[in-house]
Amino acid sequence: MRRDCPVQHPGRHDPGSHIRAAFSRLAPSYERMAVLERAAGERLLEMLAVGPQDSVLDLGCGPGHLTRRLRTRTKGKLVGIDLSAGMIAQARWRTQRTGITFLVGGAEDLDFDGTFNIIFCNSALQWFTGPGRAVDGCYRALRRGGWLGVQVPATRQWCSLVRDVMTVAAQDPRTSEDFRRFRDPVFFMATAEEYVSLFNRSGFEVHDA
Ligand SMILES: C[S@@+](CC[C@H](N)C(=O)[O-])C[C@H]1O[C@@H](n2cnc3c(N)ncnc32)[C@H](O)[C@@H]1O
């Protein structure tokens, strides 16, 4: 992955551009509002049992609030990556002198090889435009025996409220700028078994879904 601001070629299809733009606009207030994501992230932290020497990637790290929580658990290499430059600017600003590296980049373009022993991915996979490519990249980025922990908001059926909220937000003048292009971009699978297949296809053994 190229460090910082991957070049966007004019005219080239960029499927993540509206997601990147929307999250950059949300970035300054995201941390304050992310009550649900924070609670789910804490649970994922517990499940991954991050230890003091672990080398960790926080994929789709947003403004780095959970990356900072990871820092309290490990002194090892810690990298946060997010598609949104606005989110990464917030993360850098809020996380000085902690030795965390924050990079702007897409999960689909990971370029690490056996670098981490844990990848933490909270509330982000559902936004990836190429989830299969992202999971392949995670597999390559992990050392043998490493762990990928992913929290996604279950199935579309379970999350039907999200669709209703987006429809309303797209019409409300206060939020329409952010939401008007959100025509069902969210990646959901129908069952836990489908998620298991997604991870199995990249070579992962799934221990809990
Ligand atoms: C709901 S926020 C979650 C942020 C943080 N992980 C948390 O739990 O609060 C989703 C994040 O995924 C990022 N994102 C969306 N698509 C991405 C992609 N293809 N690659 C990397 N990050 C992406 C967004 O910019 C956003 O910061």
Image (cartoon, grey):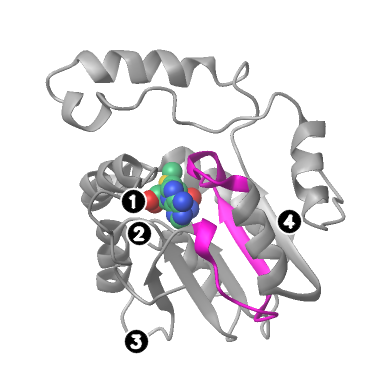
Q: Quadrant of the C terminus?
A: top right
Q: Is residue 78 shown in magenta?
A: no
Residues packed near mark 3 inside 10 Å, few (<14), some (14 to 19) or many (20 plus): few
Residue sitting farthest toward the front: 11
Q: Earlier in the sequence, mark 3 or mark 2?
A: 2
For the residue marked with disc 1, what is the amino acid?
A: Glu
Asked whether the beta carbons under mark 1 and mark 2 sit within 8 Å of each other, the answer is yes
For the residue marked with disc 2, what is the amino acid?
A: Pro
Q: Which residue is mark 3?
A: 97
Could you say which disc has been placed on residue 31 in the image?
1
Q: Secondary structure at mark 3?
A: loop
Q: Is residue 117 shown in magenta?
A: yes
Residues packed near mark 2 inside 10 Å, few (<14), some (14 to 19) or many (20 plus): many
Image vertical order of residue 52 relative to residue 177, above or below: below
Question: Quick check: can you spot residue 50?
Answer: no
Image vertical order of residue 161 relative to residue 57, above or below: above
Query: Residue 162: image x %, image y %?
Result: 45, 21
Q: Earlier in the sequence, mark 2 or mark 4?
A: 4
Q: Earlier in the sequence, mark 1 or mark 2?
A: 1
Q: Residue at left 24%, top 23%?
A: 180
Q: Is residue 198 left or right of residue 75?
A: right
Query: Residue 1: image x %, image y %?
Result: 47, 73
Query: Residue 176: image x %, image y %?
Result: 19, 23
Q: Secondary structure at mark 4?
A: helix
Q: Secondary structure at mark 2?
A: loop
Asked whether the beta carbons under mark 3 and mark 2 sit within 8 Å of each other, the answer is no
- Where are the magenta residues, as a range? 107-131
For the residue marked with disc 3, what is the amino acid?
A: Arg
Q: Earlier in the sequence, mark 1 or mark 3?
A: 1
Q: Is residue 20 left or right of residue 107?
A: left
Label 1 near ligand 1 (CB < 8 Å) = yes
Residues packed near mark 4 inside 10 Å, few (<14), some (14 to 19) or many (20 plus): few
